[in-house]
Image: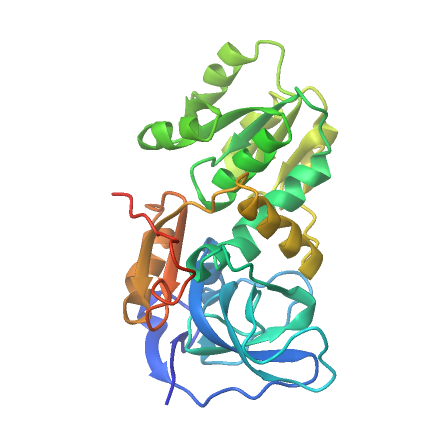
Amino acid sequence: MPKAYVFTQYGGPETEALVEQDRPVPGPGQLLVAVRAAGVNPVDWKQRTGYQRPGQQRRELPAVFGNEAAGVVEEIGEGVTGFAVGDEVFGNPVAGGYARYALFPVAVTAHKPAGVSFTDAAALPVAAATAYDGVRQLGLPTGATLLVTGAGGGVGVAAVQIARADGLNVIGVASAGKKDLVESLGAAHVPSGPDFAEGVRALAPEGVDAVYDLVGGEVLEAAAELVTDRAKLITAGGKDIVAGLGGSPVVRARTAAVLDEVVRLVVDGRLDPLVTRTFPLEEAAEALRTVEEGHARGKIVIEVEGGAQVASEGDLVSEVAE
């Protein structure tokens, strides 16, 4: 039977397990996909603790981890058009992507270009798409200055690159150990910590034109003091307090059209998903701990049954020491 990495109840890492499950059957509007790679994100472990997006139904347990994946279409559900068995795709699974097989809703599934590896494609539907939605939401003119907090994580590195491709000046707040990474993306680096605002003011004495926050809490509150127009303060990390600061959450589109736009940036060389480390499905626990404990640089991806080897020829996945 095919394997999947699940949580059996809501709680901590002790609830996780690698199990065997029946192969799913696609329903109307769904694709059955043989997964080649699955991205790892903070929302994955947060869902294990019981986190739910507004309006989201509580998941049936055991629940498979993972909110983004890439693979090959194996079966097609009723009413599906535009996809065929054998198509290479990526998107947001219905109920988890850390598995040999997953169901994908066609509404948030896109075709993977031949020149993009499964590993890179699996890193796009959550982090890169969130970054894309936020930068488009801000709608800044060329030459404006954007402050990105949490610039060294999966969403952050994508946001920096997309903003730079739009001709924006970017200041990225990240740990001192991620200085080289942030600067390699074309952003000015400011070390994270209680005094980060002073570092930003040294680079932008009159304030920044916008803030894309990925941290929340006290970092978001301090960043709000740096932006000249609070309408240009958005967050994916502090949705509970941002309205009180005059800003707003990142508005997610969650459409196949956005996935097409994001992967086009990759094909054009304007966006590198920056997959810095990969793990086999059997080591999903370690992959998740790397993200949950805050040690990840860029994106962490789980490869299923040699996903990197079945990727397009010539695509390489680099591994960066933590």
Residue 273 location (% of width, % of height): 47, 47
From this viewpoint, is residue 94 visible?
Answer: yes
Please, which colouring scheme is shown? rainbow
Residue 253 percent across, percent down from the top left: 70, 54
Q: Residue furthest front?
A: 313
Q: Position of residue 123 (x, y in %)?
A: 48, 55
Q: Quadrant of residue 209?
A: top right
- Horizontal arrangement in the rendering, residue 19 relative to residue 64 (left or right): left
Which residue appears at 37% of the width and 43% of the height? 297
Rendered position, 317 above or below 78: above
Give the residue at x 72% y 77%: 81
Q: Quadrant of the N terminus?
A: bottom left
Q: Quadrant of residue 19?
A: bottom left
Q: Which residue is rendered at x = 38% and y = 85% of the image?
A: 2
- The foreground one among 162 and 55 is 162
Number of numbered discs present?
Answer: 0
Residue 322 visible to the viewer: no
Above or below for 156 versus 6: above
Quadrant of the image occupied by residue 99: bottom left
Q: x, y percentage for residue 212?
A: 60, 34
In this picture, residue 157 sits left or right of residue 257: left
Is residue 276 toward the left or the right of residue 321 in the image?
A: right
Quadrant where the C terminus sits is top left
- What residue appears at the point 32 percent right and 57 percent down from the top-left corner? 278
Horizontal side of 293 relative to 73 (left or right) equals left
